[in-house]
């Protein structure tokens, strides 16, 4: 079971879209995927048709006190047979302070995933991939998801003033690699407007300065992405032949080289 954390401390940079489309593309390839919403705003939970306020079993209740609980009991189904899901709720807003006195908080999700990797009484794994959709903050929550992951996938909105925050994020993630040395870090440029000189310049800067981490694939901007979300689906499954659906599929294939 491979674990991918979609992370960036900036908001609105395509984390949820990337996590959802990655899940869609992996499911098309025949993989079984567990998506986990780690954002208090519960955007992915909403896209998947759940109202986080009415759910009593969300990732928050598990993380707040995992003692005696099994993460598998928090899994919900989706309309996609190959994709399951653990929802988020607003409680996650406060989790960073709530965990302040918990000694081993950083391994909560790693331990939780061990419980679902191979279910009791079974000899086969239940999921091929777990994908965490993170909140836009370098928080305990993001750290614990990166601690449980083999790949940190960073969607990067091609803006010139995002390059320094990106470098800052990479430095933070490198610190996490001291405890999780197998963590690979890859950057996926998203919402790129390739015809604009500005976006071309930003892409060139990334290639010059961060080539070790940069994926070759990139995702262009199209309204079809939010349109698909309003139908509860990723663009890879609604507009299969759209260039952005194809690009998300290519990005997924590229990512598979690293996990
Ligand atoms: N390739 C794209 N083209 C156009 N719009 C996109 C694309 N990818 C994502 N979007 C839209 O941009 C907005 C922000 O994307 P998304 O919610 O995935 O970002 P996020 O990083 O998860 O945000 P947050 O930090 O608030 O959780 C959403 O309305 C989403 O539908
Ligand atoms: Mg999001």
Image: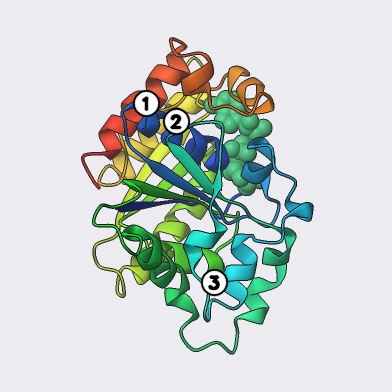
Write down the residue under mark 3: 140
Write down the residue under mark 1: 28
Residue placed furthest toward the right = 53
- Which mark, by number, is residue 24? 2
Give the residue displayed 78% in from the left and 53% down from the top.
Answer: 54
Q: Position of residue 226 (x, y in %)?
A: 64, 25
**In front: label 3 or label 2:** 2
Q: Alpha-carbon distance for marks 1 and 2?
A: 6 Å
53 over 235 or under it: above or below: below
Give the residue displayed 49% in from the left and 64% down from the top.
Answer: 71
Which is more N-terminal, label 2 or label 3?
2
Q: Does mark 2 have its CB less than 8 Å from ligand 1?
A: no
223 over 208 or under it: above or below: above
Which one is in front, 208 or 126? 126
Q: Alpha-carbon distance for marks 1 and 3?
A: 32 Å
The reply to whether callout 1 and callout 2 are in contact (CB within 8 Å) is: yes
Q: Position of residue 159 (x, y in %)?
A: 54, 37
Q: Position of residue 2 (x, y in %)?
A: 30, 51
6 over 256 or under it: above or below: below
Q: Position of residue 48 (x, y in %)?
A: 63, 37
Label 3 crowding class (10 Å Cα cut-off): few <14, some 14-19, many 20+?
A: some
Label 2 crowding class (10 Å Cα cut-off): few <14, some 14-19, many 20+?
A: many
Q: Alpha-carbon distance for marks 3 and 2?
A: 27 Å
Viewer can see residue 157: no
- Check disc 3 and report its element: helix, strand or loop: helix
Which is more N-terminal, label 3 or label 1?
1
**In front: label 1 or label 3:** 1
Give the residue displayed 32% in from the left and 45% down from the top.
Answer: 209
Which one is in front, 208 or 84? 84
């Amino acid at each position: 079971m491979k674990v991918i954390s979609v992370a960036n401390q900036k908001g609105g940079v395509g984390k949820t879209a990337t996590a959802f489309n990655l899940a869609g593309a992996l499911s098309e390839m025949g993989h079984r995927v567990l998506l986990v919403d780690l954002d208090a705003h519960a955007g992915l939970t909403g896209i998947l048709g759940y109202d986080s306020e009415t759910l009593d079993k969300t990732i928050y209740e598990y993380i707040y006190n995992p003692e005696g609980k099994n993460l598998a009991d928090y899994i919900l189904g989706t309309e996609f047979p190959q994709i399951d899901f653990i929802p988020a709720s607003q409680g996650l807003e406060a989790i960073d302070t709530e965990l302040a006195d918990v000694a081993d908080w950083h391994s909560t999700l790693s331990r939780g995933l061990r419980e679902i990797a191979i279910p009791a009484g079974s000899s086969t794994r239940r999921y091929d991939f777990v994908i965490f959709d993170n909140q836009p903050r370098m928080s305990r929550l993001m750290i614990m998801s990166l601690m449980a992951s083999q790949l940190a996938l960073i969607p990067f909105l091609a803006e010139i003033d995002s390059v320094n925050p990106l470098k800052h994020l990479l430095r933070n993630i490198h610190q996490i690699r001291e405890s999780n040395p197998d963590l690979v870090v890859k950057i996926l440029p998203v919402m790129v407007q390739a015809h604009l000189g500005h976006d071309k310049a930003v892409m060139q800067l990334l290639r010059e300065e961060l080539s070790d981490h940069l994926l070759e694939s990139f995702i262009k901007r199209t309204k079809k992405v939010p349109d698909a979300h309003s139908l509860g689906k990723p663009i890879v499954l609604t507009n299969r032949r759209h260039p952005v659906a194809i690009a998300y599929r290519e990005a997924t294939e590229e990512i598979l080289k690293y996990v």
